[in-house]
Every structure is written in structure tokens, then in C-alpha cells.
Image (cartoon, helix red, strand yellow):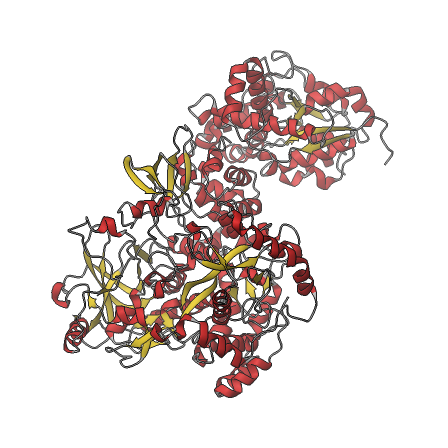
Amino acid sequence: MAETEDSKIKIPYFPGCTLKTTAKNFESSAVKSAEKLGVEMVELPKWNCCGTVSSLASDDLMKHLAPVRDFIRVEEMNEEGVVDNEYRMLTLCSMCFNTLKQTNARVKASPEDLESVNNFMYLEKDYQGKVEVTHLFELLDEMGFDALQDKVTHSLKGLKVAPYYGCLLLRPKSVGIDNAENPSIIERFITAIGGNPVENWEARSRCCGSYHTVENKAIVVKLAKGIIENARSAGAECIITSCPLCAFNLDSRQEEIIREDSEYRPMPVFYFTQLLGLALGLDKKDLRFEDNFIDPEPLLVQKGLNI
Amino acid sequence: MYPDYMKTSLGKVAGTREQRLRLAREKGKEVFTALSESQRENVLSTYHPDYKDDARREVRIGPNKGELLTDRVVDILESRPRDPADTFDLSKVDYEADILILGGGSAGLSAAIEGAEKGLNVLIATKLRLGDANSMMAQGGIQAADQKDDNPVLHYLDVIGGGHFDNKPELVEALVNDAPSSIRWLENLGVMFDKNPDGSMSVKAGGGTCRNRMHSAKDYTGAAICKTLRDEVYNRPDNIRYIEFSPATELILDDKGQAAGAVLYHLETKEYSIVKAKTVIIATGGFGRLHIRNFETTNHYGATADGLVLGYRAGARLLYMDSVQYHPTGAVFPEQVVGFLCTEKIRGLGAQPVNKDGELFVYPLEPRDVEAASIIQECERGNGVKTPSGLTGVWLDTPLIEMINGEGTIEASLPAMLRQFSRFDIDIRKQPILIYPTLHYQNGGLEINEKAETTIPGLYVAGEASGGVHGRNRLMGNSQLDIIVFGRRAGQNAAERVLGGVTTGKLSLDHVRRYSEELDSLGIVTERISPVILPDYIPDHVKAKQITLEYFGTLS
Amino acid sequence: MSEERKMVTVYILGEQFSVPESSTIMTALEYSGFQLKRGVGCREGFCGACATVYREKGEYKLKGGLACQTVVSDGMTIARIPFVPAEKPAFDIEELKPDVSTFVELYPSVFRCVSCNTCTKICPQDINVMDYIQDIIKGDIASAAHTSFDCIRCGLCALRCPAEIVQFNVGMLAQRLYGKYLAPRSEELDKRINEIENGEYRKDIDRLKSLGKDELVEEYYGRDISIT
């Protein structure tokens, strides 16, 4: 393996809870792909849930504690020399990204709120406000999709990939990684790794149903089917996502769609990092396709992309 | 924080530490010569509290009539029942059970689980909460001969030698044979034993053991076991019910002389309940809160030997109730922790008892009675350190543990001890602790056979309340073993008896009536009442104003 | 002792008492005339029966501690918490898996944790309570078991938690799952259990059982001691 000439980036990495439990395929493919691209994702030495569920707390202050505690970890990583002047916090999960970025924006905009949060967490050092929350798509964009293309060894040979943004990568505008009405970042990513992005399909940023999947999965089943059929009619062979909850709703809930509709044809749903890893020539075991609900192997075999 | 005047002595201890560390590191040689049999006898008979002239007196009533038993124990045996026998209408039964277990420590909990396994209806009655027992407080370990260089035969020798060869052989056999499978049983329930990186059990030595066989869960061994057993009991509501704050005040027999239940007294609502049961297991623990010879104790609040009284009145014999175990290393500073247990594991890890001049004066791992007597001897020679509250103690040099086993050992293996003393600004990693013997364990009890049976049909005893397993002196780690082995045996055998068919006759408290009558005929006049139930710590100046005080305990 | 003891004022459930300065909250209660039945157990810091919340004079912070271990201070106001209500689901440990799915089923409230660390701050055992709850959320049962190990179930964490998690039950389950399923297996134990079942030591123990005291004394003092 030839040594990369690019300088190595060591970046604080915030995994989020699902990446350690039900979305191990997301993390495994991401970490190994990043390695290939010269990026060392350094997991926060101690981290807590980003608090995305904390809207259940009735106190407005409480829900910001969790994200800020993680920002303090990043500042500590810098103070202790674990990373060198690197205050970007890398996230993979769209929900973690959105939650963390919104809180960061709130406390940076309001010194009083920041002081309240810091005072409450008196056992921690104060958060100085230095962290920038970033998503892997943004990091790849910053490093340059052309540069990425140069590193691709196993191009996706024009595989028709539908970029599913979901809600939280784009909305609200203040935290979105791209223009909410007309985003293109994931399409450019797909092109860079040799795929053929499905353009402008209507459901690309339609909500998957999110937590309705717990209490009222019929809603999710209906929404998921709509999104998948919309992608299919636009020419998609598969869908990529950046959110474990979207992945669950679009991938695992196909079980119910299959049960309800005997004519339904399953569609593979990947984490974007799995296709990234495939294109970079990663070992199959790091891509963990066996964790995906709809088996993507038949599609990959058919396209000559299996490894 | 140690007061300034102790600085000199602390300095001396630190001064001899290097030399004592070298002694500890010498392979194949003990840091101090262990005592021979006759030397043991000598130090015991001169200094051990049990051997004082006024330590025992003759009990005048009951199955052990005429024997010399520990003075305070005779007090409670020669006391009046709390209520006359005919107070209770035994035809009005409040609870029925296949197995009634008195006591919610690890012995009672083990018995309950075994009874539930057989599908029976078990009722546990406890004085305080389920799990409030000495079991929860045990620290250092549980013995089992599972290591390659060890075996149950060596374990047998250790037990019987430590017990002054008075142990009942079949009980020792049961103890050592059941030991490894007891560990496995506990582990299957989820107890987290300390292990080495390769998965083998991490075992240490204890007083009087010839091999490392002390299994532990840091220094929370008793708690790890008791919490797990209790959690499992909570998991079986269909088979196991429990009533808390309801100590038993009398055993109920039937007209055939079988154990048939108990009278319970609710501490808060003051209600009495009648329990009818096909079998009864006494697992009421020890007697530390009787403060024998006015010693402070390691025991929990409810340890008042209630079960002993109940069984004795019903006609069960006692064994070795002339023997009291004083744990050699009870805390003696600061004032707030006087009497607290400082686990033997501390010595198992290499700490040495040293006098005020920093000198080693005893082999650190003698059996407990010998160790305790040696410490008392050293203090009476004037080599102890006085505390501000007027007590005396010797040092236990804990910093040695870090030096012998590596930095971080105390934090990993003795977190309870580290915590206990750091609450009072003493860091045991850097400074030694001050210790003196404290009242700890009831070596004897109601006599049982290897099935945990007494001579009363249907009455079983398990745990500290029983007598014969440990002879006249128990080794560290064998009580945690005893409660599991005999707790399970009591549960299994009680279950077997129930499944074999038990017909309970007419319920009766005649044995209580007869006991009272005999007290009268012997001319024993006393206001003392037993079972004691709880100790009484209300100061005199308050008592003087509690003119219509409701009667509780029998401590004078 | 007849010397004058220095006394301090404490407020027990709002009522003023004068107690010796060196008292713990527990002995202060007894000194004031209360015979304890609730809120007392081992008296040595192992059983969690004596959970107490208190404030010190002039301080706004609400503190938690064990009555048997906490020394009083002048002006301290004290409330005893002898019981914390909490449901514990009954389970068959043989049927549980040692991973996050067990907690999703039995203790779903765990996932409400807002990472506020209030539980850690009130714990009288200085346990990083929030950390082990977060460990569960991350699926790291082993770490949760070790971090929660010293818990004595006093209940203060559960009482203070804004997300109404019952931390002490969650920790207990993690410990049992670790002890049963995740701890490495000790093979020497299995071997010895088999040997005993096959009667390998029966003869030798029978022989010891038959010996008289003098012979036992000789064997005992003659046995070789090999400890480390």
C-alpha cells in the first residue's frame, strides 16, 4: 500500500449510540474508508449520547447538556495533545450531526446560555466554544471530490444510486450541509466514487417517518414504500443514507412491505460509507453487508461489483 | 486525618517499611514465625477474651443445661419470652407456606431459591429488609479449593485445624466438597468474581490457610453475592414471598413436636402474625449487637441471635456457644468507624500488623483467634497507640500492599476500605490504619447435621446461626462458603421433606409455656426478655425522660 | 466519658436537636432519642439502608450521603430517605442476552438519559453513575458492570434523575449479565467440580474423618504451607 502524500488528518470523532450497537456497519465502513483517505478518526475518549431524544425533557436547558459535554471532550483532546489544534468534531449519523450542530450554534450565539450550561456542569471544565461540528460528507467535500475520485480503485461502474438526504442533513437551514431545496453534495459524492446518481428525485429529502417506527410503524411502512418506489421510478438500483434511523425505516421495514405486497421488489439500502469503502477497495469484512437487512450482494454480483 | 501526636509513631512505621518489604519479598520464608500448637494455646488462654474467668457461666435451663456458655448468651437464654404463650390464638393463621425462612441474608436467600426451584411456596420473614444481614457486609472472600495446587483435603485440614479440631467431621466434609460447585452456582447467577486475565480465578491467602483459595469480588464479596441472590429472589414472585420488618418472636411447633411455623411481630404496625409452615429454616445470623464484653462489633444492626433463642426454647441443642470470634482487625480510628470490619484480605495482600515502634510482632496470617489474642497481648504490653477517644490499637501497614503488588492494587482490590477511610481524610495507600480486635462472629450455634437438620423434625438451621461447621473458630472465607453450602442444603432438604409429604398437627406454643414455667421453678427472676430484636442506643439522659417507654431490648 | 463534649445544632426533619460534634447523622439521630427501624442496616456503609439528603448551613447545594458515614456539621438540615420506589421487572436470567437489547426490553427508560450527571453528583459511593448508564446505551455491558460494581443501592440517584431512570436496577442487571455471560470462564473450577463428583478425594477425606484429635493435630501442623 503506497504511502499517501497528503498530510494525515487526525480528527476527533463522535460516533453516537447506534453506531456502536445497531449500525456497526456504518462505523466500520466509515472508519476504514477514512483510513484509506488519510484521515484518522480519533474517537472521543469518553462521550455521551448526543441527546437527540432529549426533547422528552421538559426543561430547555437540560437538552443542551449532552452535546456540550461532548464538545468539552473535544477541547480536552486538544489540551491533552491527543489531536493537534483540531477542533472539528466529525459525525456520521445525521441525527447526531443535526443535534450537536444546533446546540453548538445556540450556545455560541448566547453567552448567557453557555454560562448556564457551564455552571450546571460544574464538575467539568467550561466549554470555550471552539468546536465546529462537521459531517463526513462536508469533510470529503473539503478534501475535494476530485481528490477522492483519484483514490478510487474499484469504481462503482455507473451503479444507479439514489442519494437519500432525509430531513436532518438539510434542515434547518442554519445547520444544513447544503441548499435544502436543491442540494447536490451527495450527488457529487456518488459521481466521485464512480456511481451514477439519480438526479432530482422527488422523495430525496422526504421524511422517512423517524420515531413513528416505534409506536406507529404503519406510517413508516407507507412512507418508506413511497420513497423507495419514487427512487425506483427515477431509475435507482439502490439507495444510500447517512442516518441509522432512516436506514432502519427504509431497509428493515421492507420486511413489512414485502409481507403486505407480494409484487414488491426489495431495494438495497446502504450507508454511504459502505459504497465509499467498496469503491476504495476495502476488505469485505469491514463493509459488513451482513448487517444490512435487504441483502445487497445479489445486486453487487449482478453489477460485477462484488469483492 | 491522624492527630499530630501520632506523627512519631507513623514515622517509625514508615521507617521500618523498607526492611519489612524485603522480608515480604523473600521467597519461601514467612515474615514472622507462626506459633506452634502449645504457643497458640498459651497466647489464647492468657489474652483471648473467651478465656477470661467471667467470660462464661453455667446455663441453668434447656437442652445445654449445666454447660458453660458465653455470659451474654446465657443472659438471653435465661430471659422471659416476649409474650406469654396463650397470648396467641393459633387457630387464626395469617400466612401458610411450605418453607418458612427466618432471616434474609445469603443463607436464607439461597435456601429460598432452592425451595423455589422445587416449585414450592416459600415465605421469608426478615427483621429489617431482605438482605440486611452480616452477609451484605462481608468483604474479603469465599473459600473453595479449586486451584491446581490445592484440593478439598487440604481445605478440610485447614478448617478443622482452625476450629481447634472440634468441628463436626461430616459438616466439614460437606463444606469443602460443595465449595467449588457453590462458586459455580453463584457465578451462574451472575456474581462477578475477581479473575486473572487468562480467566482463572484470582485467589488469595487468608488466616490459617495453607493455599491461596480465597475467591473475592474486590472487597465487596459479601455484597456481590447477597445482592445477586436477593435479585434472583425478586425474580421469583410466584414462589417466594417475603415480609420485611417482621422478626419472629417464637417458633411454633405442632402436637407431634414438628416445626410448624412462627409468630411474627411487625416492628412498625406492632401487629403479630401467625405463620403455619411445613418446614422452618432458621437463618437469623449472629450476635454482634449483644456487645459481648462491651466490645464494639462489625455486625449489622439486627444481629441479636434471635434464632438461637427460638430454637433453644423449642428444644434444639446448641454447640460451641462458649466460643466468640473477635475479628483481629477492627477499625479503631477515627471514632466514627470504631468496630468496623477491616477485611483480612488486607493481610492476604501483604499488609503487616506492627506496633507503635513499627515492629512486626506476629505472623500476619494466624487463624483469627490467635491473631486477635496476639494483638491484645501487644497492646497490653504497652506497645499500642492510644486514640483520642481513649481506645488502643496497633497499626496495619497498608502502604505495603501497593509496594508488594504494584500501584493501584488497593484501588482495584480494596475499594471499600479505600473509600471508608478516605471519607475521613486517611489515604490507606500512603498511611497505615489503626486496628484492634472487634466482636465479629458466632462460632457455634444450633447444632446441625450435614443436611442442615436439627433434632426437631422439620427445623433446619443454616449460616452463622448454626453450630458445628467451624468448631470453635472460623477461618476467613468459610462463613461466606457456609451460608451458600448449608443455605442450599437447608432449602433442598426442607423441600424434599415437603415433597415427601408433611402433615402438620395442631399448632402449639406449649414449649414456650413450659420454658417460662421452668424459669419460674428454677427461681430465675429477671426482667430480661428475649429475643432481643434490636440493640438500644438511646442515651441515658433521654431515657430518663422516656417515662412510658415501650419495651424493646434486653441490654442493660 | 465525663468531659464536656462539643455540641452542634442539627435539624432532623426540620426539628432542632443538639448533638455531639463528632456524631454521624445516624448516631445523632440515636442521641436525640430515635430508635431506628427504618433507614438503618449494616451501619458501616455497605447496605444502602441509610440514604440521607441534607444541606449544610448557608449552602444551596443539596447533598446526598449515608447517615452512618456522614459526620454532622453545625446547622445541617437532614431528611432521611429509607426507601426509593422502583419497579423491578422479574426475568429469567437464563433467557436474557448480554447486550443492549435486554435493556431496551427491561429498562427502556435508560434511553431517556440527558447526560446531566445529576446521579453522579449525589452518589455517596462516588460512582460515575452517568457513565455506566451511557455505557448501557452504547451497548458496553462489561464496562457498565465494572463501573457500577460498588453500588450499594441507596437509591439517591434514581430519586434525583430527571429522566426517571432507576440506575441501581440497571447496574445490577449489567453486573449479573457480565458475571454470568461475559466474564471469562475459569476452567480449573470445572475440572475440580468434576473430580469431586467422581469421588477423587473421597478416600482421603474419609481417612481424615476417622482420625483422632492427636493425629489430626500432627497432620495439621505438618501440612506444607504454600501461599503467595
Q: Is residue B155 left or right of residue B469?
A: right
**Residue visible at 74% across and 27% down?**
A84
The relative height of residue B500 versus residue B204 in the rendered view (above or below) is below
The quarter holding residue B226 reads bottom left
Q: Is residue C190 left or right of residue B110?
A: right
Image position, residue B87 (x, y; %): 12, 63
Whether C26 is drawn above or below A295: the answer is below
Badge count: 0
Q: Please tell me whether residue A305 is drawn above or below residue B396 in the rendered image.
A: above
Q: Position of residue B414 (x, y in %)?
A: 55, 53
Q: Is residue B500 left or right of residue A153?
A: left
In the picture, which quadrant includes the C terminus of chain C? bottom right
- Residue A91 seen in render: no
Residue nearest the viewer, comparing C99 with A194: C99
Residue A252: x and y in percent read 56, 34
Looking at this view, is A192 or B297 the one in front?
A: B297
